[in-house]
Amino acid sequence: MNCQQLATYTNWDCAPAGLNSMLVHAPLTLGEDGQHVSFYVMQDAPGRFFLTDAHNTIAHALDHGARATVARLKAISETPGAQRAKLSQDGEITAEGDASDLKLALWDALRLAVAISNNEVAWLPKTRQERFATLVAKTLRARLPSGSVVTKPKMLGISGHQIEFPIGVLLPGGGIRAVQPIGASEDHKVDWGYVYQSYGKLSDLKKASAEGHSNRVVVMERGASNDEFGKAATVLSEAARVVLYEDDMAFAGELIAA
């Protein structure tokens, strides 16, 4: 099937995207910013097709602050009627089969994409700390190499427990750096309970790491008074390097630098 045939059958927009490949745009958009649901369709063998959204649907949700947990994606994967398309654990929509099934597979893939899009608002973080961690992750994903930012990495502490951090950055030379965002409270004060909780995790990791091994960093949000901010930074600096959040390349580079 070529683009002209596909456009005739579906009334979707279509454009060539390489050898035996097409990029098709559905008449529906993701969220409210006008980005259309899109899929790559490839002929991987005579009379066969493979379809993928290349993670674009879930990436749109993440870029707008949504938290796509394994449980939430599993619920989407069970969307009624989406029999010819599937959703992977990391959010990729795919389908494959005989060319005669392509039209139905596209509509089933669209069902999954719309289900994700419809949940973008419901999946937004509920607490101030979650919202700030999401903001930090969004900045890093926009400015660091693709795939270098991971969510909720677990690292072994001196206690013998696997310690979970909100964000991790894969370092160019190998290894991972735990990123612990610390947001200001709604009334522009330091959330001391969260500071001490984070200090405990970072200290546990520090004691399990080689001396001078920079595998942890704290990202602090502006907003609290200079006095409170300074006190919190002093406490946290005993367990990790502390940097101030900025929505720019210099900040992202600092988190991935040796």
Image (cartoon, helix red, strand yellow):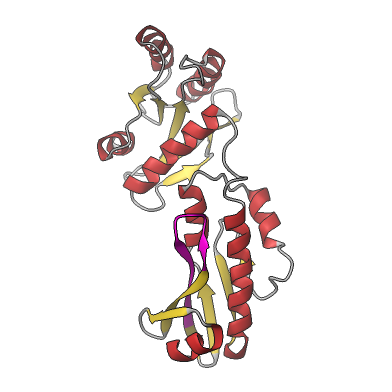
Quick check: can you spot residue 156?
no
Please check the rendered image and state whether residue 40 is part of the magenta-colored stretch, yes or no. Answer: yes
- Which residue does the image show at 57% across and 70% down from the upper left? 94
- Left/right placement of residue 167 relative to residue 148 reads right
- Left/right placement of residue 101 relative to residue 205 reads right
Query: In the image shown, does 249 or 217 lie closer to the viewer?
Result: 249
Quick check: can you spot residue 234?
yes
Q: Position of residue 120 (x, y in %)?
A: 57, 50
The image shows a total of numbered marks equal to 0
Mostly what secondary structure, the magenta segment? Answer: strand
Q: Position of residue 21 (x, y in %)?
A: 42, 82
Q: Is residue 211 above or below residue 50?
A: above
Quarter-of-image position of residue 238: top left
Q: Position of residue 67 (x, y in %)?
A: 57, 44
- Which residue does the image show at 53% across and 75% down from the upper left? 51
Query: In the image shown, does 209 or 250 lie closer to the viewer?
Result: 250
- Left/right placement of residue 41 relative to residue 85 reads left
Q: Is residue 160 above or below residue 256?
A: above
- Which residue does the image show at 48% across and 23% down from the upper left? 202
Quarter-of-image position of residue 18: bottom left
Q: Position of residue 149 (x, y in %)?
A: 42, 45
- Which residue does the image show at 32% across and 32% down from the upper left? 246
Please check the rendered image and state whether residue 103 is part of the magenta-colored stretch, yes or no. Answer: no
Q: Is residue 257 above or below residue 143?
A: above
Quarter-of-image position of residue 107: bottom right
Q: Quadrant of the C terminus?
A: top left
Q: Residue furthest right?
A: 80
- Magenta span: 28-42
